[in-house]
Image (cartoon, rainbow, N blue to C red):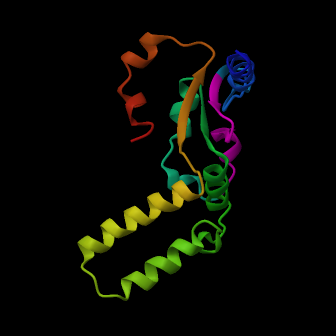
């Protein structure tokens, strides 16, 4: 009986452990994201020198009154901001070890097909080792009017 009671009490403490949080994004919307995720507005990133390489049409977003946010793992966003700042990504602490492995394996003389499969597996291993899970892009609008989006083919080009 004591063991069952101890198990029940322990289960109450364990159920309160949370691996996610509800975050308010610029007072526009709430989103339930993992604890290691954060967000950044694309408007905040628009001043960076390499933002054009992402292929985002800010005029279309502005025409429709949309705000875009990148919500993702802090490490991914750190890498993205480094890229946008024009930093040398070959010196990044996550990419540098991969480059060394890739260069070493490239000298081994394996076929291109095997090399590309090996590369994908190494990237997956590195992501898993660093516990990097991913990212999403969220669009938010204060006045969402479905007719505005349905009839305008230009909206489909924003992320293509």
Question: Does 32 lie within the magenta span?
Answer: yes
Residue at the farthest front position: 1
The quadrant of the picture occupied by the C terminus is: top left
Residue 120 at what x, y percent from top left? 38, 62
Residue 143 at what x, y percent from top left? 59, 12
Q: Relative to the observer, which residue lies in front, 99 or 90?
A: 99
- Looking at the image, is 160 positioned above or below residue 117? above
Residue 40 lies in what quarter of the image? top right
* Residue pictured at 29% horizontal, 87% vertical: 109
The quadrant of the picture occupied by the N terminus is: top right
- Looking at the image, is 17 positioned above or below residue 36? above
Q: Which residues are magenta?
A: 31-48
* Residue pictured at 65% horizontal, 65% vertical: 86
* Residue pictured at 66% horizontal, 68% vertical: 87
Residue 152 at what x, y percent from top left? 38, 22
* Residue pictured at 34% horizontal, 88% vertical: 108
In the image, is 62 to the left or to the right of 22? left
Residue 96 at what x, y percent from top left? 59, 74
């Amino acid at each position: 009986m004591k063991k069952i009671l101890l198990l029940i009490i322990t289960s109450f403490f364990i159920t309160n452990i949370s691996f996610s949080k509800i975050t308010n994004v610029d007072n526009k919307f709430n989103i339930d994201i993992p604890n290691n995720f954060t967000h950044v507005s694309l408007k905040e990133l628009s001043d960076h020198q390499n933002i054009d390489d992402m292929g985002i049409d800010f005029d279309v977003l502005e025409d429709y009154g949309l705000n875009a946010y990148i919500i993702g793992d802090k490490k991914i966003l750190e890498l993205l901001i480094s890229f946008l700042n024009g930093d040398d990504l070959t010196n990044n602490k996550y990419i540098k070890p991969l480059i060394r492995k890739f260069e070493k394996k490239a000298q081994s003389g394996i076929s291109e097909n095997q090399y590309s499969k090996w590369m994908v597996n190494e990237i997956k291993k590195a992501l898993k080792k660093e516990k990097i899970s991913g990212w999403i892009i969220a669009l938010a609008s204060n006045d969402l009017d479905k007719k505005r989006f349905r009839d305008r083919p230009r909206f489909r080009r924003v992320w293509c």
